[in-house]
Image (spheres, rainbow, N blue to C red):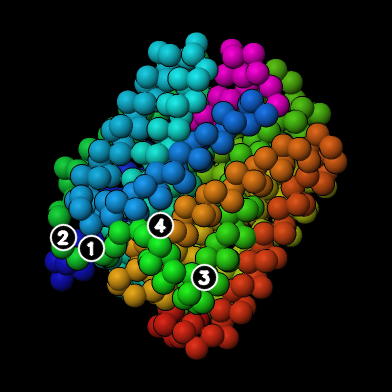
C-alpha cells in the first residue's frame, strides 16, 4: 500500500519539477525578437537562436545514451545536476549577451542539459507505473507542456520588465525544480535499464518493427508539435494586430499563446492519457493525429478573422497536438524489452527532436512565401504519416502487448 501511494507522490513531484525546469526550454524562443535586435541579425540568424536548444537536446540525448548515464548515475542526481547546470548556463547567457558566438554555445549547452531532464523523468515515472502508464506519462508531459509555455506568461508578470529577468526567473525555477527532486524523491533500484547506446543496440531497436512503427508515429507527431509551439505565438501576434495595438496587442497575444500552448496542452496531455488507457494506444493516437492535422489546416484560414475564431481553433489544436505525445513513449515502453527499453526511449526522443528543426525551419520559409493562411497546412503531413504508422501497428500481433491488450 505504501508503494502504491508513494508512486503518486513520485508522479506529482516529477510533474511539478518538470514544469519548473522546462520553463527554460522556450525562453530563447520567447525573447528571440529582442535578441535579434540586440545582435543585429534576422532571418536564418533568428531561427538559429530558436533552434539551438533543440540541437543541444538531440546531442545531449545521444551522448547520455552512448555513455549509459541512466545506468551509471542515480537518476535523481542526474535530474538535479542537469537542472542546476542548465540554470547556470542561462545566467551566464544574461551576462555575456554581447558575444553572439558564446551565447550560441551556452544555448547548445542548455539543450544538452535538458536531455538529462525530460528522458530521465519519463524513465523514472514509467518504472513506477506498470499500469495506468498512459495517464502517468500524460501528466508528466502536461508538466513539460506547461513549463514550455510558461515564458509567455512570465513575460506578462509586472516584475518582469526585460528579457534578462525572464531568463533569471526561469533559472531560479529550474534550480528549485532540481532541488525538489534531489531532496524529496526516494532512491529505488527498480530502474528501467539503459544499456550503452552502440550500433548493436541501434540494430536491435531498428529491427523491432512494432517499436519502429510507434517511433514513426512519434516522428509525425513531432514534425507538427514543436513547429506549432514555436510559431503559434508569432501567428497570434500577427493575426491579432488587425484588432489590437500597442501593449494590449502584446498582452492579448501573450495570454492566448499561453492558453493554447500551456493550458490546452495540459488538458490534452491528461485527457490523452485517460482516453488512451481506455481505448488503446493506436486508436487514440490516430484520433488525436487526425484532429490536430485538420486543425493545422484550419488555423490558417482564421488569420485576420475575429480573434475568438482563432482562439477556438487554436485551443482545439493545442489540446490534440500534445494529447498523443506521451502515448508514443508509453507504447515504446510496452513494446520493447528491458534490455533496450531505455535506449529505445532515448533513440525515439533524439530523432524526434531532430525532426522538429526541419519543420520549424519550413514554417519560417512558408510564412513569408505562401503566407500565414497556408503555412501551417504543411505540418499536416506529419499527422497523416503518423496515422498510417499507428494503423499498421494496430494489426501487428505485438500490439496486444500495449495497454493490457487494448492496442
Mark 1 residue element? loop
Query: CA–CA distance between discs 4 and 3?
Result: 13 Å
Asked if residue 28 is among those painted magenta in the image, a careful observer would answer yes
Residue that mark 2 sits on = 188
Can see residue 369?
A: yes
Residue position for label 3: 212
Q: Identify the mark at residue 191; answer none if there is no mark.
A: 1
The answer to which quarter of the image holds residue 235 is top right
Give the dominant element type of the magenta stretch: helix, strand or loop.
helix
CB within 8 Å, label 2 to label 4: no
Q: Is residue 105 left or right of residue 184?
A: right
In terms of secondary structure, where does tag 2 sit? loop
| Disc nearer the start of the sequence (2/4) | 2
In this picture, residue 330 sits left or right of residue 371: left
Q: Considering the numbered disc 4 on the image, is that residue within a helix, a strand or a loop? A: helix
Question: Which residue is at the front of the view, 1 or 347?
Answer: 347
Q: Could you tell me if the residues under marks 2 and 1 are in contact, i.e. CB atoms within 8 Å?
A: yes
Total numbered labels placed on residues in the image: 4
Depth order, front residue of 91/340: 340
Q: Judge by depth and name the residue closer to the eye, 390 or 276.
A: 390
Q: Which residue is mark 4?
A: 346
Amino acid at each position: 500500500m505504501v508503494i502504491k501511494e508513494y508512486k503518486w507522490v513520485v508522479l506529482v513531484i516529477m510533474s511539478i519539477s518538470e514544469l519548473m525546469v522546462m520553463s527554460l526550454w522556450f525562453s530563447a524562443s520567447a525573447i528571440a525578437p529582442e535578441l535579434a535586435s540586440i545582435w543585429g541579425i534576422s532571418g536564418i540568424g533568428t531561427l538559429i537562436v530558436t533552434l539551438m536548444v533543440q540541437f543541444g537536446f538531440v546531442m545531449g540525448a545521444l551522448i547520455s545514451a552512448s555513455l549509459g548515464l541512466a545506468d551509471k548515475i542515480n537518476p535523481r542526481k542526474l535530474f538535479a545536476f542537469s537542472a542546476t547546470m542548465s540554470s547556470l548556463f542561462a545566467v551566464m547567457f544574461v551576462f555575456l549577451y554581447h558575444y553572439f558566438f558564446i551565447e550560441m554555445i551556452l544555448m547548445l549547452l542548455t539543450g544538452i542539459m535538458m536531455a538529462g531532464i525530460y528522458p530521465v523523468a519519463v524513465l523514472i515515472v514509467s518504472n513506477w507505473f506498470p499500469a495506468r502508464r498512459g495517464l502517468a506519462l500524460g501528466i508528466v508531459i502536461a508538466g513539460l507542456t506547461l513549463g514550455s509555455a510558461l515564458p509567455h506568461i512570465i513575460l506578462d508578470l509586472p516584475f518582469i520588465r526585460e528579457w534578462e529577468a525572464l531568463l533569471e526567473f526561469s533559472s531560479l525555477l529550474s534550480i528549485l525544480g532540481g532541488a525538489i527532486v534531489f531532496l524529496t524523491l526516494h532512491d529505488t533500484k527498480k530502474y528501467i535499464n539503459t544499456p550503452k547506446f552502440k550500433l548493436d543496440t541501434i540494430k536491435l531497436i531498428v529491427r523491432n518493427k512494432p517499436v519502429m512503427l510507434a517511433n514513426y508515429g512519434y516522428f509525425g507527431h513531432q514534425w507538427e508539435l514543436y513547429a506549432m509551439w514555436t510559431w503559434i505565438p508569432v501567428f497570434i501576434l500577427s493575426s491579432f494586430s488587425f484588432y489590437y495595438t500597442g501593449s494590449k496587442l502584446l498582452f492579448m497575444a501573450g495570454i492566448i499563446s499561453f492558453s493554447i500552448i500551456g493550458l490546452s496542452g495540459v488538458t490534452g496531455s491528461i485527457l490523452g492519457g485517460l482516453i488512451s488507457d481506455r481505448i488503446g494506444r493506436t486508436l487514440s493516437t490516430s484520433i488525436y493525429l487526425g484532429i490536430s492535422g485538420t486543425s493545422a489546416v484550419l488555423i490558417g484560414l482564421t488569420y485576420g478573422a475575429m480573434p475568438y475564431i482563432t482562439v477556438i481553433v487554436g485551443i482545439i489544436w493545442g489540446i490534440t497536438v500534445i494529447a498523443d505525445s506521451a502515448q508514443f513513449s508509453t507504447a515504446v515502453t510496452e513494446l520493447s524489452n528491458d534490455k533496450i527499453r531505455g535506449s529505445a526511449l532515448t533513440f525515439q526522443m533524439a530523432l524526434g527532436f531532430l525532426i522538429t528543426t526541419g519543420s520549424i525551419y519550413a514554417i519560417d520559409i512558408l510564412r513569408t512565401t505562401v503566407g500565414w493562411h497556408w503555412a501551417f497546412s504543411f505540418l499536416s503531413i506529419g499527422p497523416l504519416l503518423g496515422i498510417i504508422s499507428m494503423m499498421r501497428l494496430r494489426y501487428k500481433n505485438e500490439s496486444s502487448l500495449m495497454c493490457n491488450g487494448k492496442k
